[in-house]
Image: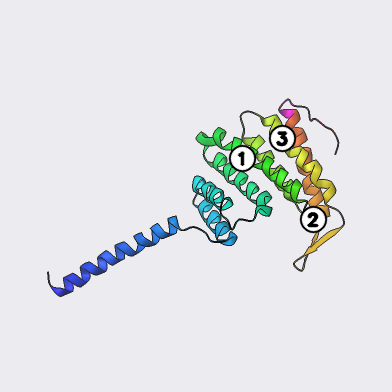
Amino acid sequence: MTRPWKILSVAILMAIAIPGAWLIYHETRVPQNQMEVLDRMIELQREHRYDKAIQLLRDWTANPSYDPTQNDYYFQQLAMIYFMKAYERPRDRDQAILPSAANLRKATEAFDKKKPAGIRLDLYEIGRTYEELGNLARTNKCQYYEDARASYIRQLPMIEGESYTAYDHTTPLAPVRAEITKHLEATKLKLTQTGCAPESEKQ
């Protein structure tokens, strides 16, 4: 083989080997901090690789660098990933809905233990996921709608005042209360339409 062809062959092999090596590194690297975990989780969800994203979060919660005070957030994220899997993969729907609901319960428990200061919308976000699980589920619809409703009922009194300022941005709170109330009424209607009376009529 002449020298030019040898050089060309090496170049071709390098062109093949370098992307392959990068891909192996990209797939096997272990995130070193929370920001890397979140970036990788978002990337995996965009690729619809939900099982990989779930495993990533589970591995991170077992990492010595993991901050257990963030349990409420990570359980919410796990619940959302399972929900997206259920939404996009009907054949896996029943198997994905159950762990989504289980992680929402864990997120609620972690939130209650944490008792965060300031205005937080964790319970509203948990309620929205429960509500969407009720929309998707073939069984336990009543339970998911009731859990959503309970989360909304708990969230409403936490939205106090006319506005909330954080990071130099002020948010009016009347539209936030209106949005929560809208979903509270929607879940009440869904419970009735599904043949389940709400456990409580309180607003």
Q: Residues within 10 Å of mark 1 (few under 14, many from 20)?
A: many
User: Most extreme residue toward the top, as rendered?
Assistant: 195
Relative height, residue 193 to residue 34 (above, below): above
As drawn, the label of residue 21 is: none
As drawn, the label of residue 119 is: 2
Q: Which residue is mark 1?
A: 100
Q: Earlier along the polypeptide chain: callout 1 or callout 3?
A: 1
Q: In screen coordinates, is 53 left or right of 120?
A: left
Q: In screen coordinates, is 80 left or right of 149?
A: left
Q: Quadrant of residue 171?
A: bottom right
Q: Nearer the viewer, residue 67 or 128?
A: 67
- Tell whether label 3 touches label 2 (CB within 8 Å): no
Relative height, residue 174 to residue 202 (above, below): below
Q: Which residue is mark 3?
A: 145
Magenta-tinted stretch: 193-199
Residue 164 highlighted magenta (yes or no): no
State the residue at coordinates (60%, 56%).
66
Q: Nearer the viewer, residue 80 or 88?
A: 80
User: Most extreme residue toward the front, as rendered?
Assistant: 64
- Tell whether label 3 touches label 1 (CB within 8 Å): no
